[in-house]
Amino acid sequence: MAAAKKLVVQKRDDGKFEGKRPGGERASVVRDTQHEAIDASREVLRRSGGGELAVRRIADGEIRKQDTVEPGNDPRRSPG
């Protein structure tokens, strides 16, 4: 079974935002704002067949939002 595709959007030390695979060395996406990084990361996942998008809070780094990007496989049938 293949590992789930996932990108995590988080703030970098240089003040920019990145979309990066967990455990990855390089970011797939780097943008000036969190909103731009979320949109670009969502598009990367969509083009690669879907997956999970997680967004970290700026203040404490905790995951504040997680979403399935189509055509990913969302195991739960609940909104959000």
Image: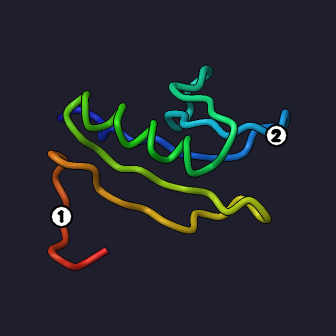
Horizontally, is 20 left or right of 76 in the view? right
Horizontally, is 77 left or right of 60 in the view? left
Residue reaching furthest to the bottom = 78
- Front-most of residues 42 and 5: 42
Residue reaching furthest to the right = 14
- Residue topped by disc 2: 15
The image's mark for residue 40 is: none
Callout 2: helix, strand or loop? loop
Report the residue at 69% width, 37% height from top: 32
Vertical position of residue 66 compared to residue 23: above or below: below
Horizontally, is 31 left or right of 52 in the view? right
Q: Give the distance between the C-alpha atoms of the residues marked 1 and 2, in whole angstroms.
A: 34 Å
Q: Quadrant of residue 55?
A: bottom right
Vertical position of residue 26 compared to residue 50: above or below: above
Counting the numbered discs, the total is 2
- Front-most of residues 37 and 48: 37
Vertical position of residue 2 compared to residue 80: above or below: above
Q: Where is residue 18 in the image (x, y as percent from the top left)?
A: 62, 36
What scheme was used to colour the molecule?
A: rainbow
- Front-most of residues 37 and 49: 37
Q: Where is residue 60 in the image (x, y as percent from the top left)?
A: 77, 64
- Residue topped by disc 1: 75
**Which badge, 1 or 2, comes first in the chain's sequence?**
2
Report the residue at 62% width, 21% height from top: 25
Say what amino acid the circle numbered 2 marks: Gly
Q: Where is residue 6 in the image (x, y as percent from the top left)?
A: 39, 42
Quadrant occupied by the C terminus: bottom left
Contact between marks 1 and 2 (CB within 8 A): the answer is: no
Say what amino acid the circle numbered 1 marks: Pro
Callout 1: helix, strand or loop? loop
Q: Position of residue 38 (x, y in %)?
A: 50, 47
Report the residue at 72% width, 45% height from top: 11
